[in-house]
Image (cartoon, helix red, strand yellow):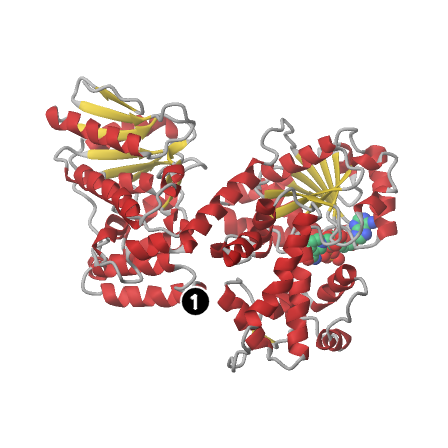
Amino acid sequence: MTEFNHWRIEREAGGLAWLTFDKAGESTNTLSAQAMLELSQALDEFDREPPKGLVIRSGKSAGFIAGADIEEFTKVESAEGAKALVQRGWDLYNRLAAVKYPTLALIRGHCMGGGTELALACRYRIAVDEPGTRIALPEVMLGIVPGWGGMLRLPQVIGAAPALDMMLTGRALDAKKAKRLGFADECVPPRVMENAARMLVLSGHPRRQLPFMQRMMNGPLKGVVASQAKKQVAARARPEHYPAPYAILDMWANYGGNALAVPAGKPTSMEAIAASLTTKNLVRVYYLQERLKGFGKDSDFAPKHLHVIGAGVMGGDIAAWAALRGLTVTLQDQSIERIAPAIHRAAIAFKRKLRDDTQVRFALDRLIPDPSGQGVRQADVVIEAIFENLEAKQKLFADIEAIAKPDAVLASNTSSLRLEDIAAGLKHPSRLIGIHFFNPVAKMPLVEVVEGRESDPQALKKGLAFVRKIDKLALPVKSVPGFLVNAVLAPYMQEAMRCVDEGIAPEVVDEAALAFGMPLGPIELADTVGLDIAVAAGQQLASGISEPPKKLMELVSAGHLGRKTGRGFYTYNQGKPQKGAVGQMPAGLADRLIKPFLAAAQRCVEQGVVADAELADAGVIFGTGFAPFRGGPMNYLKERTA
Ligand code: NAD
């Protein structure tokens, strides 16, 4: 029998075989060239002595398979190399799909990319019902396509519409949804998973058939489905910025899901994708995200109780998010009436996110209204999110310090006050750090962890660990006005508003930024943040260097504060800006808008606000949505001059 490094074959007396993927020397399974080669050798072995049934499972507690080996994939430099990599998986999984004996993938924990494609090549799939089970084809997020049979098989298994949704967005299924959509034949709890696998793989059950209409959508109606999906993609991503989703649609609709069948020269070919800078930059974004995830990982700080003071826009949502993530949270404000709206908002958000009444109940039980602030005494982390008023914050922290546990983290969510000034109210100013969330808390992945001049490094480490614990990306920054994210956004938004003062229509300004790849135009962004907040941020950051934009000041004096009042630069109808047609675009407008953004990012790196250029890119991408396919402002500057 062949000896394997990464796979294990066990045969049962009744003829059932188990093939366990347990990558040597690593905590997660990734499909490296070596692991794929061994899988093909395992199939040779089963050709020689076919089992009655084969179950493929993982030997890792972390999950099933995390996908292809990204390290290997990033080393591919030519289109030829990329095609060879695709060919390897395409052929191997076609071979697995064609074996005569029944096969089953037993999926517990993460199942991504090439792992999902392997599961799709099996006759049956069982998804184990536990919170870590997530099944996805996230290739599009790296600018590539599911080329190992995913585009061929997923639509056949779950139908074209949900399959395209998964492949075009990278969205994951949990175990229950996998069963509901027909990806999994069964969804079972962990304690019965082996038995369930044994019974199903030997059951002789025929493959599940899609209903008639669904089969039509994979057949004669493909073109219609593809053109609908293309419209949806076009609303989110432009082909010149993100070629991969367009390639997925073309490969599925016109080439049987075979990436290698698209002729070179077409913009949807493997050659075009391999040559696009987008892929390189999206992989870079993936690594940046991994780097941010690393902050706080090495700490043994395990906070269980968060106390939040101020139940407004920010405090209320920070409290809800942390409760959703499993912490016990006490939420304080001046009265119970001020806390009630935050609890109401949380209840709606929990229902939408958890979709299970018991889980919603548990999450709400963890979020405790605390008007008298009793929670401070037990809390591991205390976050202040009250009005932006220095005296009030100083007084509050003096009170907190007197009763909080001596090792609790004390943090302010302030956007514009100096941490050092707030800390002046403390006996031990070194205890104070900043934990700066962005609005809306549930949507924004980044949180800046701010080091004041006197902040204790241990407190900072704990702050980073806390942010990690609640599944946000922590970015360590120094205490300077605007930290990193607002310091780069403010001059860019000011420049945009100056363009409007010069007579360029807001629609034109926004379109220039969208064409560059920003997720939202700067004028619409200002309306969304609130024009009063934009004025305050501008004053703090420009600090008298330049006149505030005229139109902005006029709107604010008239009480038109943006989306929240129904009118700002745009008029809003049911929350949507009413935009006119985009007229003539002045030459160089996008460059003019982006220039202050890039200059501010560069300044932040030079001033050491973040430790290096890579972290500036990471912070700006996850904090502002800066065109991910450009790999961040510092990367863009480098590429532009290369
Ligand atoms: P908000 O006005 O919505 O809420 C502030 C809350 O604090 C109010 O409910 C008020 O009753 C309460 N409060 C005031 N003094 C208090 C006290 N002494 N004790 C208990 N509660 C008290 O404000 P917000 O927009 O949530 O901002 C809060 C903080 O977050 C500010 O420091 C702000 O700079 C910062 N921040 C705001 C945003 C944003 O977009 N709104 C983004 C990041 C950070």
Residue 253, visible in the rendered structure: yes
Q: Residue furthest front?
A: 642
Image side of residue 632 versus residue 404, left or right: left
- Coordinates of residue 261 in the picture (x, y in percent): 21, 54
Q: Quadrant of residue 575?
A: bottom right
Percent from the top left, x then y, of residue 600? 66, 57
Disc tally is: 1
- Residue 381 image position (x, y, % from top left): 71, 36
Q: What residue would you read off at disc 1? A: 235
Secondary structure of the residue carrying tag 1 is helix
Task: Kindly identify the residue that appears in the image at 61 percent across and 49 percent down.
Answer: 616
Q: As shown in the figure, which amino acid type bears the numbered disc 1?
A: Ala
562 with respect to 481 (left or right): left
Question: 527 or 181, which is in the foreground?
Answer: 527
Q: Quadrant of residue 250?
A: bottom left
Q: Quadrant of the N terminus?
A: top left
Vertical position of residue 206 compared to residue 526: above or below: above
